Amino acid sequence: MKKYIFPLLAFALLSTQSWGQMKPTEAQTELNAYMDDGLVTFKSQDGQYSFRVGGRLAVDGAYYIDDYTDRSSGADLSSARIRIFSKLGSKLDVKFDIDFASGVSIKDAYLRWHTDRAGFLRVGHFAEPFSAENIASTFDYNFINKSATNEAFAPGRALGVSYRHYSNYLWGEGGIFSQKIGKSHSNGDMGWGVTARLLARYTGEDWAVHAGGAFSYRIPDANGFANGNDDYNRSVTLASSLESAIDKTNMLYSKVNNVKQTFKYNIEGLATWRNLYLTGEYTHGKYVRERDWDYNFQTSLGTLMGTFTPTPEIYKSFFGPDTNAEFSGYQVQAGWLIRGGDYRYNKVDALMNRPGRNSLELIARYNHTDLNYIEPGSIFMNGKFYSNEMMASWGMANTSVVGGVANTFTVGVNYYFTHNIAMKVNYSYAHLDQQYSDAFRYDKNLHTLQMRLQLEF
């Protein structure tokens, strides 16, 4: 991964302009306001160095009405974070965010270098710039949970380096990433990826609009060594608990094996006008697969299968070529600030700002997530997919992957007592199609009522 990071660092250095004595950038101004508002703060006399300690707490409760599979209603402390911010001179700042709610989990941990008037270089552990939903903070996001599509496809946080540009009409961020901090890893090479998000935008006095998309390419982590190498044993899991804060049963679940590389893209749009907003995203994932044909053929020699497929070419033709598994999903959401002023667009993150004191908000979201990939011409028999009846008689299933389809509609009401204290109530109805699953075949209509009380200081 180093051979990709160093050229990116060099590019950022070459793009640096001499602006150290000029006024702070928008990103720095945003951070300075946050630093000044802290309960535990320190600032040097010249203002060049400052330090702030803060935290976040979130308590969630959920009640489930189920069809067949019993989900566990209850309450939990979903977030208990200690957050440290530090300003180091005129161009550098640091963020360290650790969550103690369930064990110890590092969230954000990065160094940020403001290279020019509308950009910064960031190194550390942070959200990959894949979509608005992926990079939005859970406290700033309007709903209690992000959509099932985001849960299944979005890369989340990872260790890496990226550069962000945020001018008036253009927003872009791209970087190179490894894996998440704390993620267990087997022997073999760690995976790596390249992710970028690019938007065109325009803002007025009481409105804003942006449109664009994101792309992510990744080679998954190896799962140890098999047959002397780590090239063919990589797998990717796509799963979702259907926007559930308490019960984490994955009602949607797909595991794709023999993955060589993945390609994902996202298309997004956002519009705000005074106290109304509308956003939408579409995500598509392509998982390129390749089996270890040489090893599989060698192990077939001397067997009945080897008699029918005496050469590698005949063997591969008999089983059929490798196919790419593809999945997709989309979500549309809207909101209305009944009380509390208008929505404000954040130019640094290309997101909406959190509503302020005494704000009352109504929100709605529709989400469709499809984690089924069925090879064309397949027949379904005895719980598996086969390319033809002869393969079925031999018990040789093809590489179809069925994780289920869900359509979810969520409505919610949020009240912000202050900018830092809020209560959220969400109701969601999910229609689940798991006709090929033994575990969730009888689950059709799922109802969820959830509430969150969140505090930031």
Image (cartoon, grey):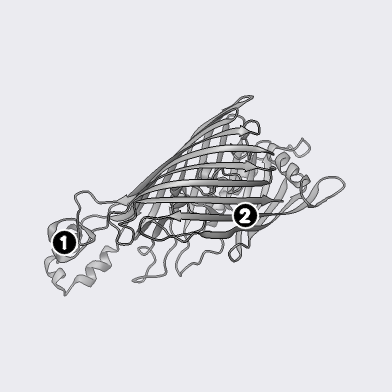
| Residue 283 visible to the viewer | no
Give percent across and percent down for residue 324: 31, 51
Residue 280, placed above or below residue 58: above
Give percent across and percent down for residue 194: 49, 49
Q: Nearer the viewer, residue 214 or 194?
A: 214
Q: Report the residue at 52% width, 64% height from top.
A: 183
| Residue 42 visible to the viewer | yes
Q: Report the residue at 77% width, 45% height from top.
A: 37
Disc sitting over residue 58 in the figure: 2
Q: Nearer the viewer, residue 155 or 359?
A: 359
Q: Amino acid at mark 1?
A: Ala
Secondary structure type for disc 1: helix
Q: Report the residue at 63% width, 51% height from top.
A: 454
Quick check: marks 1 and 2 in contact, CB under 8 Å?
no
Give percent across and percent down for residue 414: 59, 42
Decide: few, some or many residues near mark 1? Use Cα within 10 Å; few <14, some 14-19, many ≥20. Answer: some
Give percent across and percent down for residue 224: 42, 69
Occupied quadrant, residue 82: bottom right
Secondary structure type for disc 2: strand
Q: Nearer the viewer, residue 26 or 105?
A: 105
Q: Earlier in the sequence, mark 1 or mark 2?
A: 2
Disc sitting over residue 392 in the figure: 1
Q: Amino acid at mark 2?
A: Ala
Decide: few, some or many residues near mark 2? Use Cα within 10 Å; few <14, some 14-19, many ≥20. Answer: many
Residue 387, placed above or below residue 199: below
Query: Which-is-in-front pick, marks 1 and 2?
Result: 2
Disc sitting over residue 316 in the figure: none
Q: Is residue 308 left or right of residue 217?
A: left
